[in-house]
Amino acid sequence: MKREEDEILRTSFWSDPLNWLWHKPQEWRHRLRFWHNPAPGPEFEPVQDARGRTYWLRQSQSEIGEIGVWRLFYRGDQVGEANGLRFAGEANFDVGNLEIDPAHQGRSLGAVLLSRVEAEARRQGASLVTGRIVAKDAAAFPGLMAWYQAQGDDVQVVEAKPSRGGTHDVAQIRKGVERTC
């Protein structure tokens, strides 16, 4: 009897894993997300990393101005985030933050997020994507400036000086965005 139940359970899971996940108790859904990596919700878009693994991307807009937020998930956990802002009347779209969890770095996920930021800048009519690298990040990630340059960005090293919030900028990032008609 036990063997028949195991066979039914095994075949029902592999024949339709999503249906099986939603009809089992919550603890099974939690355990099985590590095997299956289902979409966290219908508003999530699948993206592939350099190794062919599927991640889930969600874009949301803030109610305050034109702030775009992109969050990247893998197996139910957030592993990356980018945000950008365009003030009314300005030609620049400013990247405020672009982070990938250290365990997921080196898989082209930063490039995926940066391309989404550039697409949003293009959609909003911006001609330039800008950002900055602060001293703390430059020290923690020595290859950060080289990474931005590899993405086609113009990285200009500036004299370390206090900026908004008491941080120190060490580089400014600029990239022209071609508009599509």
Image (spheres, helix red, strand yellow):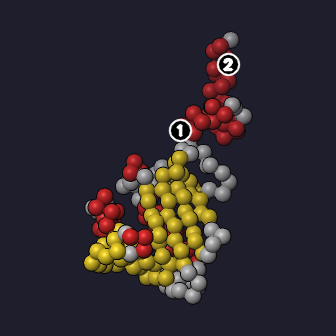
Q: Which residue is mark 1?
A: 34
Mark closest to the chain's N terminus, 1 or 2: 2
Q: Is residue 67 above or below residue 4?
A: below
- Residue 149, x across and y down, in percent: 33, 72
Instruction: Identify the image quadrant of the N terminus.
Output: top right
- Count of marks, rendered view: 2
Instruction: Identify the image quadrant of the C terminus.
Output: bottom right
- Residue 87, x across and y down, in percent: 56, 81
Instruction: Give the residue at x 30% y 72%.
Output: 170
* Left or right of 106, for residue 30: right
Residue lying farthest right? 23
Q: Of the residues shown, which amino acid type is indicated by label 2?
A: Glu
- For the question of whether residue 3 can be seen, the reply is yes
Q: Which quarter of the picture shows residue 14?
A: top right
* Left or right of 104, for residue 15: right
Question: Is 11 in front, or is 26?
Answer: 26
- Residue 85, x across and y down, in percent: 53, 74
Q: Is residue 170 above or below residue 88?
A: above
Q: Is residue 22 above or below residue 53?
A: above
Q: Of the residues shown, which amino acid type is indicated by label 1?
A: Phe
Check disc 1 and report its element: helix, strand or loop.
helix
Residue 5, numbered circle: 2
Check disc 2 and report its element: helix, strand or loop.
helix
- For the question of whether residue 15 can be seen, the reply is no
> Mark 1 packing: few (<14 Cα in 10 Å), some, or many (20+)?
few
